[in-house]
Amino acid sequence: MNSIATLGSHCSLQVLKGAKDEGLKTLLVCEKRREKLYKRFPFIDELIIVDSFKEVLDQKCQSILEQNNAVLIPHGTLIAQMSSDEIESIKTPVFGNKWILRWESDREMKEKLMREANLPMPKPVTNPSEIEKLSIVKRQGAAGGKGYFMAANEEDYNTKRNQLIAEGVISKDETLYIQEYAAGVLAYLTFFYSPLKEELEFYGVDQRHESDIEGLGRIPAEQQLKSDKVPSFNVIGNSPLVLRESLLDEVYTMGENFVEAAKRVVAPGMNGPFCIEGVYDENAKFTSFEFSARIVAGSNIYMDGSPYYSLLFNETMSMGKRIAREVKLASESNQVDKITT
């Protein structure tokens, strides 16, 4: 039987609690500075203490994971802390498709896969001189919104970029990605695709709370206009959302299109959890500006199960538990290679 391992950050508590609920051994690669936090939780069987998460690439750490027959669950911290080459070099079986994480980390590749999936997208802006309407400027990878900013024109872009460089938030040689800003109700749509059952499951929806762009809405316009601070889009937390039922058919269609596109473009495809991120406008039309090709932190709000998963399972089912269930079923049927890379 396999055990479950992950990095001590992002959604590790949900992942390991779900694994323990499924009767699997749990291992946490834990930075020394967070050891006190994670020792509080009895469902974590073993802490692998490291100074830096990059030590998961070292032979010592790999050997411990191998001895425990571990499956490594990737999340946003893995992508934020390591390059695509480093992630792809991990010897431990990685749940899902580690190759697709490169497509998540690179903005141009991400855009290509979203187009392949026919997802409705905002218009990309190839050069700051081409900014004609309010646009959002993003960093590469899983930065959690930190360093993102809005720009109305090229001058606005240069002013804000230079200010963020001066503040040390972004680097001078960093490649930034620009797309027209899509306004509406934020909706982050989370799915799970099982290659064992060849079925797509819609897991749930969340909204992200970003500081300090969200706090600005509570400040009178007069004071906002006097501020020259570039507001941050740093994600602080998440809250649940339930969609109008009439929107669900389109949600499933988008998820299925994404799974089929991933199969064509980056074998073995989009296996396990993923998220299509976007907004609904005043006509309930969805525009997708991102995807995440692994478990997202928004699933943490549904540790006792989501409204949509309660329709599919007659038991409490978090995303962490769903991942563990898939690993367990694959292990019992000798198909672990079908769900890992």
Image (cartoon, grey):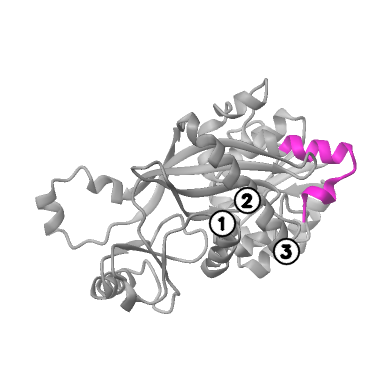
Q: Is residue 5 above or below residue 317?
A: below
Q: What x and y, as percent, mark residue 238? A: 44, 39
Residue 58 bears which disc, if any?
3
Three-letter code for the amino acid on which mark 3 is drawn: Asp
Marks 1 and 2, the one that precedes in the sequence = 1
Residue found 36% across the figure and 42% down from its top: 283
Residue drawn at x 57%, y 26% as measured from the top left: 304
Q: Name the image quarter holding the N terminus.
A: top right
Q: Amino acid at mark 1?
A: Asn
Can you tell which quarter of the image residue 109 is in? bottom right
For the residues bearing labels 1 and 2, Cβ distance under 8 angstroms: yes
Q: Earlier in the sequence, mark 1 or mark 3?
A: 3
Q: Which residue ends up furthest to the left in the rendered image?
A: 222
Residue located 50% across and 37% down the image: 205
Q: Give the magenta part as a residue range.
A: 324-341
Name the residue carrying label 1.
Answer: 118
| Crowd band around label 3 with a 10 angstrom C-alpha radius: few (<14), some (14–19), many (20+) | few
Q: Position of residue 123 (x, y in %)?
A: 41, 64
Secondary-structure class at tag 1: loop
User: Which residue is under mark 2?
Assistant: 257
Q: Amino acid at mark 2?
A: Asn
As helix, strand or loop, the secondary structure at mark 2 comes to helix
Rendered image quadrant of residue 335: top right
* Residue 294 percent location from the top left of the image: 62, 50
Disc 1 to disc 3, how far (Cα)?
40 Å
